[in-house]
Image: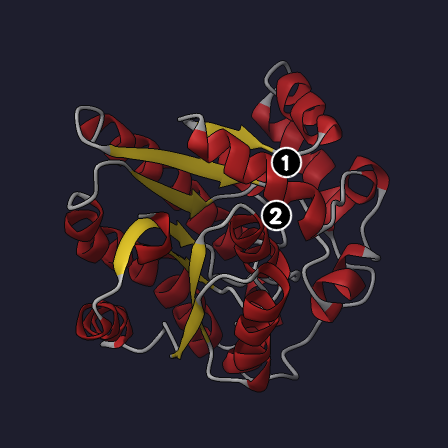
Amino acid sequence: MQKEKYTLITGGSEGIGKALAEECAKRGMNILLVALPQPQLETAAQHIRETFQVRAEYFGVDLTEEQAPYQVLEWVQQKGYQIDMLINNAGFGYAGAFEDYASPQFFDKLMQLNMRALVLLNRLFIPELKKQPKAYLMNLGSMSSFQPVPYQAVYGASKAFIYNFTRAIRVELADSNISVMALCPGGTNTNDINKARNADLKGLAKKSILNPEDIAPRAIDALLKGKAKLLTGRINRIILTISKLIPLNTRLKIAAKNLKPQQEFKQTQDASQQEKVNV
């Protein structure tokens, strides 16, 4: 029965992850939230239980830690949860010049979370998903998946990695019970840090900003329909279509002009604070 199955969502305590969790719960799915061990994680799970009358459990862990993905699997198996949907949403970004923005340790953390943790969670949970009659797997890419991104160089590269990885394993799993999709939202007001950053954008980049609640229903619809990817927002789709007609060097100059922060978000928070930026 559906009540015995769970949807596991990383980065599910705020932003897009929280909106996706609530959308799934609205459809009667039980929820497992995985995020940093902070008060809003327990609050998010409690809100889902009380609002949608489904089961909602949580596991607090820093996914940049080496053993964290394995700990998530161990928790799921020890509790006996049956996973038929996995949404890898956890990630963080930044806006600033690569050399000046932050320490090497910050970028190390970003790569650990955005790429390593995601790949390992895919590898660890695909066997779990295959135990179900039908299962779904969503990885969070971005508009940044489709070209280099000045002033978000490492973040953009990590999202390109996620998109290409996701499309590749979709082909590998085509004959299985698992439907795989890459969700590629544009700029999103996921939390106060992102809202401040997005307010600094210019031109179409600023006009394309969406809220998590705008993205979640379409994302879950597309996943359940077996779509390979979803690029959210009409302006974002227009931008991507037009950009294919423009030489890369010209695109990069336009992107740099639109994305260069008017005020640099210097590294005043530690990496764990930045990890709250789910995009």
* Residue 10, percent from left and from top: 43, 62
Q: Which amino acid type corresponds to the residue marked 1 in the rendered image? A: Leu
- Is there CB contact under 8 Å for labels 2 and 1? yes
* Residue 273, percent from left and from top: 57, 80
Quadrant of the image for the C terminus?
A: bottom right
Element under label 2?
loop
* Residue 213, percent from left and from top: 69, 49
Using the rendered image of the protein, determine whether residue 74 is visible from the camera's viewpoint: yes
Residue that badge 1 annotates: 252
**What residue appears at the point 70 percent right and 66 percent down from the top-left corner?**
191
Residue 254 vertical position relative to residue 40 in the rendered view, above or below: above
Residue furthest top in the image: 245
Is residue 28 or residue 241 the one in the foreground? 28
Which quadrant of the figure has residue 269?
bottom right
* Residue 246, percent from left and from top: 64, 18
In the displayed structure, does residue 90 sit left or right of residue 74?
right
Residue that badge 2 annotates: 150
Residue 47 vertical position relative to residue 160 in the rendered view, above or below: below
**What residue appears at the point 19 percent right and 73 percent down from the top-left corner?**
74
Give the spatial CA distance, label 2 vs label 1. 7 Å
Residue 194 vertical position relative to residue 184 in the rendered view, above or below: below
In the displayed structure, does residue 25 sit left or right of residue 133?
right
Is residue 262 or residue 34 the one in the foreground? 34
